[in-house]
């Protein structure tokens, strides 16, 4: 058997295993795959970014320019491109914004590395240069801070609007003046005394079809997407009882048999059942409760007695929504039917049913002066895709606030910060004696992709805009960025900080670090070994219950 075996690496593995090695095959192929991925999302960068139309494996349609959504719904197979996707997902998870920045910058770093590899530079020299340049860029960012919010001003409306303006511009450029005040109002309503404990989950979004974006509003409380189960539709100063059990006749854990001999016994049995339910409902009403919320089923007889005692009844089927409601009204969920002590009850200024478009919703609303635990932005729009895209813009804006309370410093936007970084790293590369200087120069050149992309997506001449940007920065105007509204070349570069275009320092630091790490990881690979895929049905792409995404 040993005599008949051929020699060589292919015979080390099972039949069907793919083995790719060498600079041209393994390294260049990986770089090309990452560059192709960056090319897809690059045209979606900035306020004038184009939308992508994606139909996922469930045939669900997405029309968006949000890179995080594009990456989540695209099933990228190439292992090198997957590294960039994982880096962008980490950015989205940690910061909530800047995932497109990671992919575009990572792809450009690899593109610049390709030209160095073709010149004969070893990947280890490129990796060393990239790591040195990344450390220098992260240090330089601290010096490029142009605006810092003091801790006492975190809750001020003007500061919140100023901080989130650029982030929302990149997603909803035409609607930014409508969406931005809504986000500021919602965040102010739930901002805790210690601002560093701000939680993005406290700002909810309710999407309602019909109308337009201008009809959107903020509600201090929770909006439940269903009508009440009874006739009571409006309750003021409501004491609320929340039950996780069914509001119906109690059932025993063990099976039992009831022997009924005649019609009198049958009537007595029915009457005793009614008396039991009425006693339970009356005990709840006597404890001062005006609104009953349940996560279980409701029997017809129970509904009758709830109506009799003039209480509102609403079913919430999602346990996550039930939990959020408890947090909003400060109620403790009850596991059995019966009287609810006052300390276990919740309170809401007003609970009412409201018709929005063609749908009825139940609103749990607090007074304007009250500190609400949760606030809801009710978005209106003509189509589901528009509502989804606005929701993504809202999520990005709220995540900027989360980033702001941890790192309150901001940089000049519109590519101004990137040009300044490119200049500083190019100067450092000139002082470096080793071969890493070439990689550092390429790292600085990679930063030019951002102002270039902004100019291209706005229909401006990228090369002329880039030349003018460098000229302005050489003169000392370090806040000069790409003005996408410029009518000609001269007006295409200006100080955008006057227009409230700022980039969060925390977002930029994390994005540069993740993109560099992803690029370096791809450059370290010199062989690809892929086993033959196993037969049988493919494993599901989505794991967990659909309600976990709520």
Image: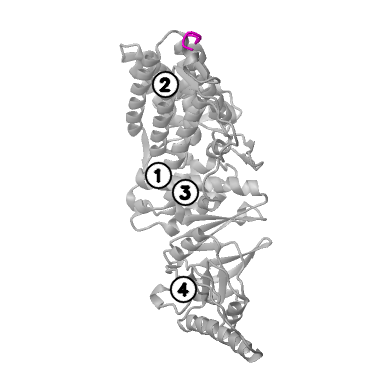
Q: Are marks 4 and 2 in contact (CB under 8 Å)?
A: no
Secondary structure at badge 3 equals helix
Q: Residue furthest front?
A: 1
Upstream in the sequence, badge 3 or badge 1? 3
Sequence-earlier tag: 1 or 2: 1
Q: Residues within 10 Å of mark 2 (few under 14, many from 20)?
A: many
Q: Front-most of 464 and 152?
A: 152
Q: Which comes before the other along the chain, label 4 or label 1?
A: 4
Question: Which circle marks residue 444 in the picture?
Answer: 2
Give the number of the disc on residue 403.
Answer: 1
Disc 3 residue crowd, few under 14, some 14–19, many 20+, Cα 10 Å? many
Mark pair 3, 4: CA separation: 38 Å
For residue 467, say whether it is visible. Answer: no
Point out residue 124 in the picture as x, y percentages from the top left corner: 37, 16
Q: Which residue is mark 4?
A: 336
Q: Main secondary structure of the magenta part?
A: loop
Of circles 3 and 4, which is in front?
4
Position of residue 537 relative to residue 269, above or below, is above
Residue 215 quadrant: bottom right
From the image, tell me which residue sits under label 3: 398
Q: CA distance from mark 2 to mark 3?
A: 31 Å
Cβ atoms at labels 3 and 4 below 8 Å apart: no
Q: Position of residue 432 (x, y in %)?
A: 31, 14
* Foreground tag (4 vs 1): 4
Element under label 1?
A: helix
Helix or strand or loop: what does disc 2 sit on? Answer: helix
547 or 139, nearer to the observer: 547
- Reply above or below: 531 against 155: above
Q: CA distance from mark 1 to mark 2?
A: 26 Å
Please provide the residue range marked out in magenta.
1-7
In terms of sequence position, does the residue under pointer 3 or pointer 4 come before the other?
4
């Amino acid at each position: 058997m040993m005599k008949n075996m051929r020699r060589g690496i292919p015979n080390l593995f099972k039949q069907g295993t793919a083995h790719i090695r060498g600079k041209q095959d393994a390294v260049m192929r990986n770089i090309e795959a990452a560059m192709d991925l960056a090319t897809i999302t690059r045209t979606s960068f900035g306020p004038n970014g184009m939308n992508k139309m994606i139909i996922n494996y469930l045939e669900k349609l997405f029309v968006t320019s949000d890179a995080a959504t594009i990456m989540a719904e695209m099933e990228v197979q190439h292992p090198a491109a997957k590294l960039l996707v994982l880096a962008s997902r980490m950015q989205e998870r940690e910061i909530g914004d800047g995932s497109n920045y990671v992919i575009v910058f990572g792809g450009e770093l690899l593109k610049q590395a390709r030209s160095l590899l073709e010149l004969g530079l070893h990947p280890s020299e490129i990796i060393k240069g990239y790591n040195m340049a990344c450390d220098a860029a992260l240090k330089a960012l601290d010096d490029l801070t142009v605006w810092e919010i003091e801790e006492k001003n975190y809750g001020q409306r003007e500061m919140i609007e100023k901080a989130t303006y650029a982030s929302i511009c990149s997603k909803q450029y035409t609607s930014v003046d409508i969406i931005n005040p809504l986000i500021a109002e919602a965040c102010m309503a739930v901002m805790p005394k210690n601002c560093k404990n701000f939680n993005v989950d406290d700002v909810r979004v309710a999407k309602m079809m019909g109308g337009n974006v201008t009809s959107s509003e903020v509600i201090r409380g929770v909006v439940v997407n269903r009508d009440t189960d009874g006739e009571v539709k409006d309750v003021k100063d409501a004491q609320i009882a929340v039950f996780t059990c069914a509001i119906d006749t109690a059932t025993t854990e063990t099976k039992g048999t009831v022997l009924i001999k005649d019609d009198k016994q049958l009537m007595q049995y029915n009457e005793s059942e009614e008396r039991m339910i009425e006693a339970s409902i009356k005990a709840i009403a006597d404890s001062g409760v005006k609104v009953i919320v349940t996560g279980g089923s409701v029997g017809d007889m129970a509904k009758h007695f709830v109506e009799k005692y003039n209480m509102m009844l609403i079913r919430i089927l999602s346990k996550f929504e039930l939990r959020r409601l408890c947090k909003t009204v400060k109620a403790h969920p009850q596991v059995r039917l019966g009287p609810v002590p006052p300390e276990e009850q919740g309170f809401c200024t007003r609970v009412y049913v409201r018709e929005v478009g063609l749908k009825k919703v139940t609103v749990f609303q607090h007074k304007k002066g009250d500190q609400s635990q949760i606030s809801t932005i009710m978005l209106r729009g003509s189509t589901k895709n528009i509502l989804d895209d606005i929701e993504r813009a809202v999520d990005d804006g709220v995540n900027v606030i989360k980033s702001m309370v941890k790192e309150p410093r901001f940089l000049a936007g519109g590519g101004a910060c990137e040009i300044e970084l490119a200049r500083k790293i190019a100067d450092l590369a000139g002082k470096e004696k080793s071969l890493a200087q070439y990689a550092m120069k390429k790292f600085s050149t990679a930063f030019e992709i951002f102002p270039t992309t902004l100019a291209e997506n706005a229909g401006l001449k990228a090369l002329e805009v880039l030349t003018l940007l460098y000229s302005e920065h050489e003169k000392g105007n370090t806040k000069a960025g790409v003005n996408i509204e410029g009518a000609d070349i001269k007006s295409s570069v200006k100080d955008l900080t006057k227009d409230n275009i700022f980039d969060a320092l925390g977002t930029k630091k994390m994005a540069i670090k993740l993109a560099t790490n992803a690029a370096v990881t791809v450059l370290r690979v010199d062989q690809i070994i892929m086993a033959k895929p196993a037969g049988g049905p493919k494993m599901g792409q989505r794991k967990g219950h659909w309600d976990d995404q709520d």
